[in-house]
Image (cartoon, rainbow, N blue to C red):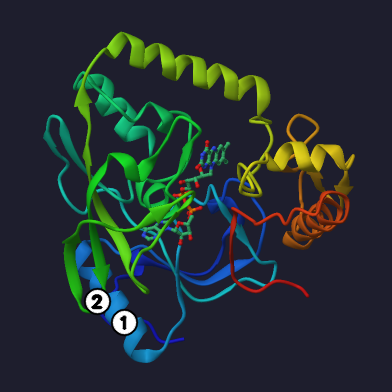
Amino acid sequence: MRLPDHLTPAEVRRNEPLAPWTSVRVGGAAEALVKPASADSLQKVLAFASKEGIPLVILGGGANTLVGDLGVPGITLKLASDYFPEEIAAPRITLNAGSAIARIVTLMKQQQLVGAEFLAGIPGTLGGATAMNAGTKNGECMSVVEAVELATPDGIGWVTGLVYRYRHTDLPQGSVVTRIRFALRTGDVAESASKMEADLAYRKRTQPLSQPNFGSVFTNPSGHFAGSLIEKTGLKGHRIGNAQISTLHANWIVNLGGATAADVTGLMAEAQRRVLAETGVTLTPEVKRIGRFVE
Ligand SMILES: Cc1cc2nc3c(=O)[nH]c(=O)nc-3n(C[C@H](O)[C@H](O)[C@H](O)COP(=O)(O)OP(=O)(O)OC[C@H]3O[C@@H](n4cnc5c(N)ncnc54)[C@H](O)[C@@H]3O)c2cc1C
């Protein structure tokens, strides 16, 4: 595959194994992992891929991504976290999409702001959190987003009013989030800190954080919890190859070491089949698949 001429060797890794770039540590290699050094370079990559018909996927922190065992054809795009300087004009904070979600939590504390407590403890990047509308029952990312900057094959610009729903934001086809402007508020910072501490303690108690995983496997169907539905089928602890439905939380799959994407998708299919047969409820994956999977 030909890549744009402007890319320097430091911006490209060919045949790069992607498992280490994801939290569940599963899957094959990227034909080319491209990490543009600047927003300008990124925009040129998008224009090139669009013109040449090269498939392109975006990988943020890989905390919600399952990579296929047969690898990812075309360009797998990673963003740097320093394309633009951070802009802090409390209560507004503008950050790079490639920055860790934890960055907003740190700045919230530093700037004595409140409003995004529900993002504490969610791994990944702010671009991923925006695309996924990440959150918890206590709130969702897009509720504190005022504007999003998008790169497309035609240029880079700010947009407002993106439509979003539970764990999904409608981003224009082929666009990459490059910056996010958050609108937070002043408030009781002590209460905010204690909410976040309580959330983190809850996560430690209920989630298998010591084992590689990608968070919740399925979204919660309306009126149900995916974890309870799977637990009722008796699948907690069920194993295929080296992947296991967590013994701690049935809506989480953990990699016991050397799991393949086929192991993981096998477990997902089994959970969907059993839950549908026993409860009539269809489980929809929250995790995003990229690349080619063994059929
Ligand atoms: C231990 C653990 C706990 C978790 N807890 C939660 C939780 O409480 N709530 C929750 O919502 N999620 C949770 N998750 C899932 C995950 O952390 C979130 O979905 C997070 O937002 C993913 O960010 P990421 O950068 O890793 O995205 P990735 O997995 O890299 O990508 C996810 C999707 O976003 C797209 N994307 C990424 N960056 C961009 C960009 N810049 N522009 C356009 N599209 C982009 C990707 O193409 C992909 O479709 C958890 C995961 C783990 C491992």
Residue 251 pos. (x, y %): 71, 41
* Left or right for 172, reference 122: left
Identified at 52% across, 21% down, the residue is: 200
Identified at 70% across, 71% down, the residue is: 293
Instruction: Please say if the residues under marks 1 and 2 sit with CB atoms less than 8 Å apart.
Output: yes
Q: Image height check: is 214 above or below 118?
A: below
* Left or right for 189, reference 122: left
Residue 270 pos. (x, y %): 84, 56
Looking at the image, which residue sits at the far left? 89
Q: Nearer the viewer, residue 16 or 132?
A: 132
Q: Quadrant of the C terminus?
A: bottom right
Total numbered labels placed on residues in the image: 2
**Does residue 118 appear in the picture of this structure?**
yes
Label whose residue precedes the other's in the sequence (1 or 2): 1
**Does residue 252 appear in the picture of this structure?**
no
Q: Give me the disc on residue 50.
A: none
